[in-house]
Image (spheres, rainbow, N blue to C red):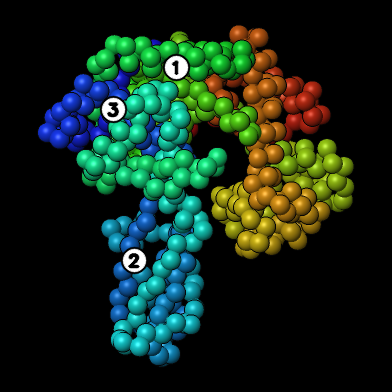
Amino acid sequence: MNSVSFYIPDNLDLKSLLSIQYPKMVKHIDKFYYVINKLYVTKFLDKRYTNATPILPYSLPQSSVSNPIIYSNSIYNINIIKDTAPATTTPYDVTFLGLPPSAHPPLMSCSHFTKFSQNTNQPRIYSSLSSQGKKAGKKLYIQLNISNLRKILTTRFSSKIINILIELGIIETDGQYIPSKKSKGYRLNESYHNQHFLKVSVVNTIFEQKLVKLQQNHILALTPHHQQMFNLLGEFHLDEKHIELLDCSQGITTNQLLSVRLACDKIRRKDYYFSTDSKTGRIFHNFSNIKKEYRKCILDSEDLPLVDIDISNSQPFFLSLILIANNICGNDVELYHELTKQGKLYDYIADKCNQNRSYVKDKIIIMLFGKNEWEFLVKKCFIEQFPNVYAVIERYKENNQNELALELQRREADFMINTLSPILIEKNIKFLTVHDSLMVSQKDAYYVHNMMKDTFIDYCGVTPTLKMTDLQQN
């Protein structure tokens, strides 16, 4: 790894701010940068936070309607408030302020007129955060464990540095601490949101050595198998010209572009990270977190592009393995097994409910990972076609809605990480895992494809459909 650098918003002049109000703390500026870097990098590279949805205001023109059609991204619960019963049926043109029409969320019908205003004849809009919205809002605050901070910043400085950053208006906190459950959450203040990054080097050599040592200890604490997978990260690099072209051509948001550029910069600097989800066994690293469209820019050590080998219908397929393990039978179960093995489940449901495949795929994942009480067309169709399969889904989530999702991801990781990866390492195949898919060099693609088939037979007696995609040609 190269010398340690921190990523901070490029409009932040921390040294000047400290010099004016806390001149004695300037010599500890590295410790301040450490906290800011933690919040900045996590915001753009950790999908728990990059996928969190910010709150957007609505505008509502004056009109009288009986059954308005409104834009909703499921973040809001919305009611229209009027003082009298509406007379016409002209829909409101409700929009998200600051968003072009192409970026509007899907339409949702709303016909709740249970609240009325006594002070005005003009329609008003009342919006409250749904449970999903509240969850997204919480994720915008990044939890910092004070015990971990003390190990790095020392007990003497950890709380002091956090408090000074709050007083200077650089960060803010949700102030919510729940013993043994939740650390206080922090985030950069609005003036530092969505700012391009500036790299600053560590000034204090002793502090730099401490950070390097912590990183080394983290890698040494990994299992030998995970250490081997971490070492494979250095076998791949980026096609810089391709990235420049993509930056110009991709219609992506500022947030997404910053996320990509930050991830790519870490790869260039060989500043690799590698973490394991303790609940599922999934692994996360620099390449797995790169936006999908940019994976075509990854090259192997011989400058060859990569091929992605993906398990079709992967989550439904691993559910099929759960059904087999629990001896669940029935004609619908047999059909489900066959469809998931062929990678045709989404197509089958799409045909039955007259929806497109992409929409059906999203809804089936919601059905598998979401609450049992959520109702929608695709779920209704699935239950009609596969009642015995859905009974297992429902039973898994009776006490914990996340349990099925966790079990599916555990099985996926057990195959991809614990079963297939050691075989590839033994065969000296260079690869990158992205959850239910592998990225390998073009020269190894067909060999690995056949090896995956054989490994699945040994693992569970069934081979799912494996889709190969040449990333640069795709």
Q: Position of residue 217 (x, y in %)?
A: 49, 14
Q: Secondary structure at mark 3?
A: helix
Q: Nearer the viewer, residue 441 or 169?
A: 169
| Tag shown at residue 323 | none
Q: Tell me the amino acid under the disc marked 1.
A: Gln
Circle on res. 33: 3
- Residue at left 51%, top 58%? 131
N-terminal of the two: label 1 or label 2?
2
* Residue occupying image coordinates x 69% and y 27%: 415
- The quadrant the N terminus occupies is top left
Neighbours of disc 1 within 10 Å: few (<14), some (14-19), many (20+): some
What amino acid is labelled 3 in the image? Answer: Tyr
In what element is the residue under mark 2?
strand
Among numbered discs 1 and 3, the one appearing first in the sequence: 3
Q: Which residue lies under the disc numbered 2?
A: 58
Image x and y of residue 290, in percent: 44, 31
> Which circle's residue, 3 or 2, is located before the other in the chain?
3
Observer able to see residue 240: yes
**Residue at the location (67% across, 57% down)?**
372
Q: CA distance from mark 1 to mark 3?
A: 17 Å
Q: On the image, which quarter does residue 226 sit in? A: top right
Q: In the picture shown, does residue 140 fall above or below 378? A: above
Which residue is nearer to you in this view: 6 or 332?
Answer: 6
The dot on residue 215 is 1
